[in-house]
Image (cartoon, helix red, strand yellow):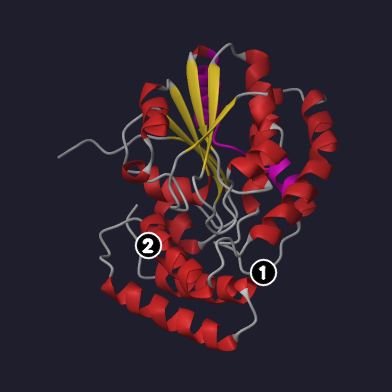
Amino acid sequence: MKVYLDCFPCFLRQALEAARMAGEDEGVHRETIHAVMKRLTDLSTNVTPPQVGQVVHRTIRELTRNPDPYRELKRQYNAIALDMFPDLSTIVQQASDRLLTASKIAIAGNIIDFAALSEGFDLDGILMETLYSDLDVDGYVAFRDAVLGANRIVYLGDNAGEVVFDRILVEEIRRISQAEITFVVRGEPVINDATLEDARFAGLDQLVEVISNGSDAPATVLSECNSEMVDAYRSADVVIAKGQGNYESLSEEAGRLFFLLRAKCPVIAQDLGVRVGDTILRRHEPAAPV
């Protein structure tokens, strides 16, 4: 998905929020915003939003001299999500369709996204709303059948805190499938995206192989990823791509992809042909080459 003009105000909002998280010096905040505006004007629009976001957040970290402005926020939501984990597990165990319920829980966790959302959110409320929402039947059936038939699954994670919700789905897939599962996180801190530290906090490393993609892009930009991640991605029977960023970066890629996300902004909703707030589990069908 190429960047829309509507994305640029969001990048500026992210820059100011991140600069303020990084420190209290208003002069640094002003310098950061000016630098980000300059770099945005120099960028091509023939790139994906995560590629723009990578430049924006490198600029923020450079000028604020803070390598991880969202660090405390990530720790906070990791802890909140882990406190919810026992109740989430119980919900799945009591469900008539455990994989469907686990998938909805994983998607509900996608609300923990401080790139897309500048205001607070009701995590418990979103969870209940998502559990009672409809998923595309054909998309879910295709997902279920693909998981059951897979030998190798790659799960592309998204955000800190959200990875605890992802663990719910990973555990359910392990219960019904013999597939080898690899969970992928970012190589360096960027926004509140999950890194190895976050995946380990969620306990994912005790269940499946967890690897870094080697990149500081806020998504999966394959040209930026290390060979270990790319090899895993290319050899997978099924790739589960969580979140808006992974949709933005991979929607034009070939492969057996399933996108799981909550549509949190008008740009993504428009691109997907859904409403803001919709729960998405969609089989990827890239357009045929012309």
In-front residue for pair 172/16: 16
Mark drawn on residue 52: 2
**Category of crowding for the residue at label 2, using alpha-carbon neighbours closer than 10 angstroms: few (below 14), some (14–19), many (at least 20):** many
Q: Residue furthest bottom?
A: 27
Q: Residue furthest left?
A: 290
The answer to whether one can see residue 83 in this image is yes
Q: CA distance from mark 1 to mark 2?
A: 22 Å
Cβ–Cβ below 8 Å for labels 1 and 2? no
Measuring 47% from the left and 64% from the top, which residue is drawn there?
57
Mark drawn on residue 119: 1
Identified by mark 2, the residue type is Val
Residue 136 vertical position relative to residue 8 in the rendered view, above or below: above
Residue 63 vertical position relative to residue 203 in the rendered view, above or below: below
Q: Secondary structure at mark 1?
A: loop
Residue 264 appears in which quarter of the rendering?
Answer: bottom right
**Split into 4 quadrants, where in the image is the C terminus?**
top left
Identified by mark 1, the residue type is Glu
Measuring 54% from the left and 17% from the top, which residue is drawn there?
180
In-front residue for pair 191/24: 24
Residue 81, image x, y percentages: 76, 46
Q: Main secondary structure of the magenta part?
A: helix
Does residue 48 appear to the left or right of 175 in the view shown? left
Residue 42, image x, y percentages: 27, 73
Residue 68 vertical position relative to residue 102 in the rendered view, above or below: below
- Magenta stretch holds residue 145: yes
Task: Please give the range of residues in magenta.
Answer: 126-148
In-front residue for pair 214/154: 214
For marks 1 and 2 on the same chain, the one whose residue lies earlier in the sequence: 2
The answer to whether one can see residue 132 in this image is no
Residue 56, image x, y percentages: 42, 67
Residue 136 appears in which quarter of the rendering?
Answer: top right
